[in-house]
Image (cartoon, helix red, strand yellow):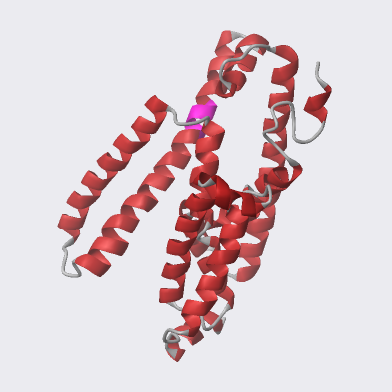
């Protein structure tokens, strides 16, 4: 149909090799930076289990991503003139299966999306109400007041998400990619916090704040974006965030020895 489909950067120039490699790394290694997934690490009994989980998780993502990519290939070959790429999976299911089976598969896709959304929603609401409001703003806040605030925060986040769904500022892939790359910035404080004894809370906060700002600049500003040399904005952002983490940790007070022993003595 078109030889450009078989070589970088593709028929529409969307996927140069550097951006392709970036997506592989982002959706495998950087996945552990997503807060709603990382909280599950706290249930693991030791580092050995954690490494198994990372390796198995990466393998699972590679397998599922490969199937997703072949869905796109099949879509190009079988269905032409699609207005929105987001419609390709439902259309393939409708054409290739009877209505009953197609409905089950589409319901499965929606269910997978819902399980991700509720995990993220709980994590974000908890971050605002517990980590920020109760621990920093109002340390005397009761559980009842925190519960009331969490309901308000949940509704506000829901409204924002619904607006994204209605007005669609980009494709599902582009919106997901931007959101997950923002969350992937947490990989920096996570890794330094696990393996570097001199890492500090101030360094972690500074790394995340600078990381978010850097990611926005590398994504939205064409002049700054050029310095990524075709790679996803998360790559230079991670380097900048790591430097900030080290520098700020060096100039702030090292955690107490008891805290270090509690986390590193295992």
Residue numbers of the magenta segment: 108-112
Placement of the C terminus among the 4 image quadrants: bottom right
**Nearer the observer, 108 or 32:** 32
Q: Is residue 262 above or below residue 37?
A: below
Q: Is residue 35 above or below residue 162?
A: below
**Which residue appears at 50% of the width and 86% of the height?**
261
Residue 231 visible? The answer is: yes
Image side of residue 141 versus residue 250, left or right: left
Image side of residue 119 versus residue 188, left or right: left
Q: Is residue 114 above or below residue 61?
A: above
Q: Main secondary structure of the magenta part?
A: helix
User: Is residue 158 magenta-colored?
Assistant: no
Residue 193 visible? The answer is: no
Placement of the N terminus among the 4 image quadrants: top right
**Which residue appears at 68% of the width and 47% of the height?**
230
User: Is residue 109 magenta-colored?
Assistant: yes
**Residue 100 appears at what percent x and percent y?**
56, 12
Image side of residue 58 versus residue 262, left or right: right
- Hey, which quadrant is residue 140 in on the image? bottom left
**Which residue appears at 67% of the width and 34% of the height?**
14
Counting labels gives 0
**Residue 235 appears at what percent x and percent y?**
62, 56
């Amino acid at each position: 149909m078109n030889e450009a489909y078989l070589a970088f950067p593709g028929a529409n120039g969307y996927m140069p090799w550097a951006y392709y490699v970036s997506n592989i790394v982002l959706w495998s290694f950087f996945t552990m930076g997503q807060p709603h997934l990382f909280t599950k690490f706290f249930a693991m009994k030791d580092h050995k289990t954690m490494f198994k989980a990372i390796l198995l998780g990466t393998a699972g993502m590679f397998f599922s991503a490969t199937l997703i990519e072949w869905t796109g290939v099949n879509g190009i070959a079988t269905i032409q003139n699609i207005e929105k790429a987001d419609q390709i999976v439902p259309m393939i299911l409708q054409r290739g299966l009877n209505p009953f089976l197609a409905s089950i598969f589409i319901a499965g896709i929606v269910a997978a999306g819902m399980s991700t959304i509720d995990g993220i929603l709980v994590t974000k609401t908890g971050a605002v109400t517990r980590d920020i409001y109760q621990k920093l703003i109002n340390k005397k806040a009761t559980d009842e007041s925190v519960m009331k605030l969490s309901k308000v925060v949940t509704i506000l986040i829901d409204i924002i998400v619904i607006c994204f769904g209605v007005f669609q500022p980009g494709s599902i892939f582009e919106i997901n990619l931007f959101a997950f790359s923002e969350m992937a910035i947490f990989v920096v404080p996570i890794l330094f916090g696990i393996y570097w004894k001199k890492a500090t809370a101030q360094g972690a906060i500074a790394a995340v704040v600078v990381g978010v700002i850097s990611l926005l600049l590398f994504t939205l500003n064409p002049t700054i974006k050029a310095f990524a040399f075709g790679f996803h904005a998360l790559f230079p952002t991670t380097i900048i965030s790591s430097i900030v983490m080290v520098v700020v940790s060096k100039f702030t007070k090292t955690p107490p020895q008891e805290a270090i022993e509690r986390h590193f003595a295992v």
